[in-house]
Image (tube, grey):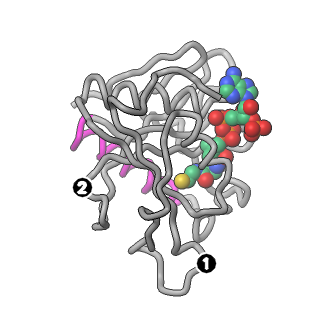
Amino acid sequence: MSTPILRTSRLLLREWRPEDREPFAVMNADPRVMEYFPATLPRRQSDALARRSERHFARHGFGPWAVEVPGVAPFIGFVGLVVPAFDAHFTPCIEIGWRLSAEHWGQGYATEAALASAAHAFGALGAEQLVSFTTPANVRSRAVMRRIGMTHDPADDFDHPRMPHGHPLKRHVLYRMDANRDFRGTLDR
Ligand SMILES: CC(C)(COP(=O)(O)OP(=O)(O)OC[C@H]1O[C@@H](n2cnc3c(N)ncnc32)[C@H](O)[C@@H]1OP(=O)(O)O)[C@@H](O)C(=O)NCCC(=O)NCCS
């Protein structure tokens, strides 16, 4: 299945390319980017994550897109849609997620790409709800969730089943967005 391409006013959400692997590895080795993950990723694990992203598109027809800023940067990270591979009170579901290289934070790129991803999920894919989750301290990610219209009910917070017991990143906040109730399709900061 080929990857659907999404265009926004500043961004191209596209298929992964071999030349993305290098900047992806640099990003995944950056402690700023990986602050709320268990560890930075060595090259081998970064490449494996890129391959998993490609396989996700092949299996589901959607996934985490490679994000390009035409005329500015050929690859700045990923934003997109993932089916979580663990069981929790909110699964099965579609998660919306993002990871951008720190040089490209603070310009609204994550929000712009997330709005396009959500529009694709609610439009072409006919999804009724999206979720997003992160550790409570990840305020930048939570701000993206809020900006695109997601809401947080503390009753939804959960312990991530993939994190070891007692790990400081085990607790997670869950945000949800319903197609009809929450999604406005535009930036509302
Ligand atoms: C989460 C992450 C993608 C958010 O990046 P971000 O740059 O804060 O988010 P956006 O791209 O939406 O940019 C928003 C910022 O750009 C500013 N901005 C500038 N121009 C803008 C525009 N045209 N439109 C919207 N916002 C704009 C906003 O005011 C906001 O600034 P602020 O951070 O000072 O409040 C980024 O921090 C990241 O990759 N983190 C590491 C990976 C991670 O933790 N991922 C989430 C795991 S759940």
**Residue 30 found in image quarter:** bottom right
Report the side of 1 relative to 107 (left or right).
left
User: For the residue labelled by badge 2, is the local secondary structure a helix, a strand or a loop?
Assistant: loop
Front-lying residue, 29 or 124 = 124
Q: Which residues are magenta?
A: 44-61
Report the side of 136 relative to 133 (left or right).
right
The residue positioned 68% from the left and 62% from the top of the image is 35
**Residue 87 found in image quarter:** bottom left
Q: Earlier in the sequence, mark 2 or mark 1?
A: 2
Q: How many tags in the picture?
A: 2
Q: Are marks 2 and 1 in contact (CB under 8 Å)?
A: no
The residue positioned 47% from the left and 82% from the top of the image is 164
The image shows residue 141 at horizontal and vertical percentages of: 61, 48
Give the class, few, some or many, for how many residues have Cα within 10 Å of label 2's Cα (few <14, many ≥20). few
Residue marked by disc 2: 92
- Is residue 30 highlighted in magenta? no
Residue marked by disc 1: 168
Determine the CA span between mark 2 and mark 1: 25 Å
The image shows residue 163 at horizontal and vertical percentages of: 47, 76
Is the stretch drawn in magenta largely helix, strand or loop? Answer: helix
The image shows residue 151 at horizontal and vertical percentages of: 49, 45
Quadrant field for ligand 1? top right
- Type of the residue with mark 2: Pro
Report the side of 178 relative to 105 (left or right).
left
The image shows residue 37 at horizontal and vertical percentages of: 58, 65
Rendered view: 65 above or below 39: above
- Type of the residue with mark 1: Pro
Q: Quadrant of the C terminus?
A: top right
Q: Quadrant of the N terminus?
A: top left
Q: In the orientation shown, which residue stands out farthest toward the bottom?
A: 166
